C-alpha cells in the first residue's frame, strides 16, 4: 500500500504550523512545538481504513481560496482512503442531548494514542494529529481537556467560542489555540467545517463536556 499521501499530509501540517508561527501575535511556541512533534512521524503500515457517510457526503464539497488551506484540503482528500474515519459515539454517546452531534461529526487521525490509533495512524504518546469533519448546522457543545490543542481550519467556516470570550467566526486558514483546560465550542451554519486538530501535550487525556 502506498502511504505517501499520509506523509504528504503530515508534511503540509508542519508547513502550515510553521507558517502560522510567523504571523503577528501568533502562539509561536505552541505552533513550532506541534510542527516539531509532527515532523518525527513515520508511516510504515496501515490497518483496514474506513469512511463514514458524512465524510463521503462533504469531504469533496468545498473550494478553498486560502492557499495553505487549499493545499491541506487536497492532501487530506488524497490521504483519506488510507485513514480510519470514526464517528464520535464512543466519546459522547452517553451524554444527553448529543445525538445530532454524534451523527454529524467524524474524525480520523494520523497520530493518536495506541488505544485509539487506526488506519494509517501512528501510535504516539507525544502528539495527536487528527482531522475532523463537522456537518452543517451542528453545535459542538462546550468541552475541555488537559491537552493543549491547536486547531487549523481547512475548509468551511464556523462560529467559535473559547473560554469566556464571545463567539467569533473562523474561516479557512485560521489558527485557534486552546490552552490546557480551556472550554471551547463550535457552531456550524449552512456549510460543513473541516479542520485539523493537533494535541501537543497530554495526548491520552479524556475530553469532558462542560455543562455549567
Image (spheres, helix red, strand yellow):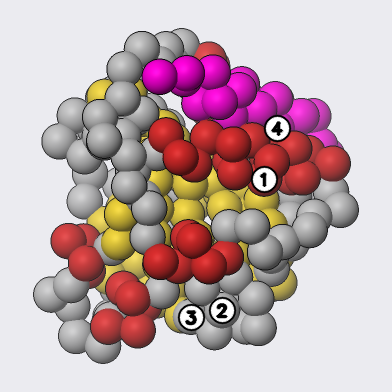
- Of labels 3 and 4, earlier in sequence is 4
Residue at the (47%, 54%) spot, across then down:
132
Q: Residue 52: x percent and y percent?
A: 37, 60
Q: Residue 136: x percent and y percent?
A: 56, 79
Q: Which residue is mark 2?
A: 136
Residue at the (40%, 39%) spot, across then down:
83
- Cα–Cα span, label 2 and label 3: 6 Å
Q: Give the main secondary structure, helix, strand or loop, of the magenta stretch.
A: helix
- Cα–Cα span, label 1 and label 3: 21 Å
Q: Which residue is mark 4?
A: 16
The answer to the question of whether label 3 and label 4 lie on touching residues, with beta carbons closer than 8 A, is no
- Label 1 crowd bin: few (<14), some (14–19), many (20+), radius 10 Å: many
The answer to the question of whether label 2 and label 3 lie on touching residues, with beta carbons closer than 8 A, is yes
As helix, strand or loop, the secondary structure at mark 2 comes to: loop
The answer to the question of whether label 1 and label 3 lie on touching residues, with beta carbons closer than 8 A, is no
Q: Is residue 31 above or below residue 53?
A: above
Question: Which range of residues does the magenta coloring cover?
Answer: 1-26
- Of labels 2 and 4, earlier in sequence is 4
- Label 3 crowd bin: few (<14), some (14–19), many (20+), radius 10 Å: many
- Label 4 crowd bin: few (<14), some (14–19), many (20+), radius 10 Å: some
- Label 2 crowd bin: few (<14), some (14–19), many (20+), radius 10 Å: some
Q: Quadrant of residue 88?
A: bottom left
Which of 52 and 9 lies nearest the eye of the viewer? 52
The answer to the question of whether label 2 and label 4 lie on touching residues, with beta carbons closer than 8 A, is no
Q: Residue 135: x percent and y percent?
A: 51, 73
Q: Which residue is mark 1?
A: 73
Q: Which residue is mark 3?
A: 138
Amino acid at each position: 500500500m502506498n502511504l505517501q499521501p499520509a506523509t504528504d499530509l503530515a508534511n503540509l501540517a508542519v508547513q502550515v504550523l510553521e507558517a502560522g508561527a510567523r504571523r503577528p501575535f501568533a502562539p509561536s511556541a505552541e505552533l513550532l512545538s506541534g510542527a516539531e512533534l509532527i515532523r518525527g512521524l513515520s508511516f510504515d503500515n496501515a490497518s483496514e481504513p474506513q469512511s463514514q457517510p458524512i465524510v463521503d457526503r462533504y469531504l469533496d464539497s468545498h473550494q478553498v481560496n486560502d492557499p495553505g488551506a487549499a493545499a491541506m484540503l487536497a492532501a487530506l482528500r488524497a490521504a483519506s482512503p488510507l485513514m480510519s474515519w470514526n464517528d464520535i459515539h464512543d466519546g459522547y454517546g452517553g451524554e444527553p442531548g448529543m445525538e445530532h452531534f454524534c451523527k454529524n461529526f467524524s474524525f480520523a487521525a494520523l497520530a493518536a494514542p495506541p488505544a485509539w490509533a487506526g488506519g494509517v495512524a501512528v501510535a504516539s504518546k507525544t502528539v495527536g494529529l487528527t482531522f475532523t469533519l463537522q456537518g452543517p448546522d451542528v453545535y459542538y457543545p462546550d468541552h475541555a481537556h488537559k491537552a493543549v490543542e491547536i486547531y487549523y481550519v481547512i475548509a468551511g467556516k464556523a462560529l467559535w467560542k473559547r473560554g469566556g470570550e464571545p463567539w467569533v467566526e473562523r474561516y479557512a486558514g485560521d489558527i485557534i489555540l486552546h490552552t490546557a483546560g480551556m472550554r471551547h465550542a463550535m457552531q456550524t451554519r449552512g456549510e460543513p467545517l473541516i479542520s485539523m486538530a493537533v494535541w501537543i501535550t497530554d495526548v491520552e487525556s479524556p475530553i469532558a463536556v462542560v455543562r455549567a
